Amino acid sequence: MNLQFDTLSANEIYHLMTQTVVPRPIAWALTKSSGDVFNLAPFSYFTPVSSQPPLLMLSVGKKPTGEIKDTAKNAIETGKLVVHIASESSAEIMTATAATLDHDHSEVQANDIELVEFEGFSLPRVKSCSVAFGCTLFEVKEVGEVPQSLVFAKVEAVYIAEEVIDQTSERLKIDALALNPLSRLGGGEYATLSNVFSVARPK
């Protein structure tokens, strides 16, 4: 089957891309509003894009009303966000935080999610997550007709739980199976890691 994108609707393109660009990592992003309300939401249009400077990028759409989503709004207003890597055990509650709430309502409070101090960073982190990146806003770029907000976040600090660190390695190495990250497929489908293998790169 060959498809031409100029013959497809925006909705058809979205579903096609999200079912073929798989698996996708998920950014579970925590922000704080200027009114001291914590927002927590998942984004699977997400990837690391640079190591010098260390940048993560998440693509944030609009609310059904057309308003800017709280994650982008808060990041722009405060300049801070925490990007978590969710595990399989977080699947249900993470999905629940995707619900659209009013700006003055917190997904953290609505879902009884425990936050803890993030040492070395001004915002807290989700206690259940084994990896959390404390970030400052680097840049926001608007793309497309809607438009979509590409949020570039500069990593200032990272929390890594001891139980996902491979203690047998001489340098810092994350045990991917212990981390057990949740990845996004199409529709309502998710996937986890079941096998990890190595292939030597050419010299």
Image (cartoon, rainbow, N blue to C red):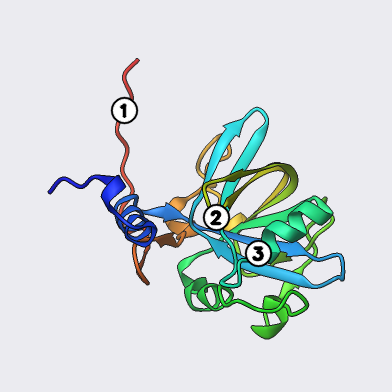
Given the image, on which type of amino acid does mark 2 rest?
A: Val
* Disc 1, SS: loop
Instruction: Read off the residue under disc 3.
Output: 69
* Label 1: few (<14), some (14–19) or many (≥20) C-alpha neighbours in 10 Å: few
* Label 2: few (<14), some (14–19) or many (≥20) C-alpha neighbours in 10 Å: few
The vertical placement of 194 against 40, above or below, is: above
Work out whether residue 24 or residue 11 is closer to the camera in this orientation and state it: 11
Give the position of the C terminus as an image quadrant.
Answer: top left
Residue 22 position in % (x across, y down): 34, 52
* Residue 99 in the figure: left or right of residue 198: right
Residue 129 position in % (x across, y down): 60, 64
Instruction: Read off the residue under disc 2.
Output: 146
Q: Residue at x 29, y 33 (%)?
A: 199
* Disc 3, SS: loop
* Mark pair 1, 3: CA separation: 42 Å
* Mark pair 3, 2: CA separation: 13 Å
Instruction: Read off the residue under disc 1.
Output: 200
Residue 146 position in % (x across, y down): 55, 55
* Residue 139 in the figure: left or right of residue 32: left
Given the image, on which type of amino acid does mark 1 rest?
A: Ala
Q: Residue at x 54, y 47 (%)?
A: 167
| Mark 1 or mark 2, whichever is nearer to me | 2
Image mark for residue 162:
none
The vertical placement of 115 against 81, above or below, is: below
The picture quadrant where one finds residue 137 is top right
Residue 164 position in % (x across, y down): 54, 55
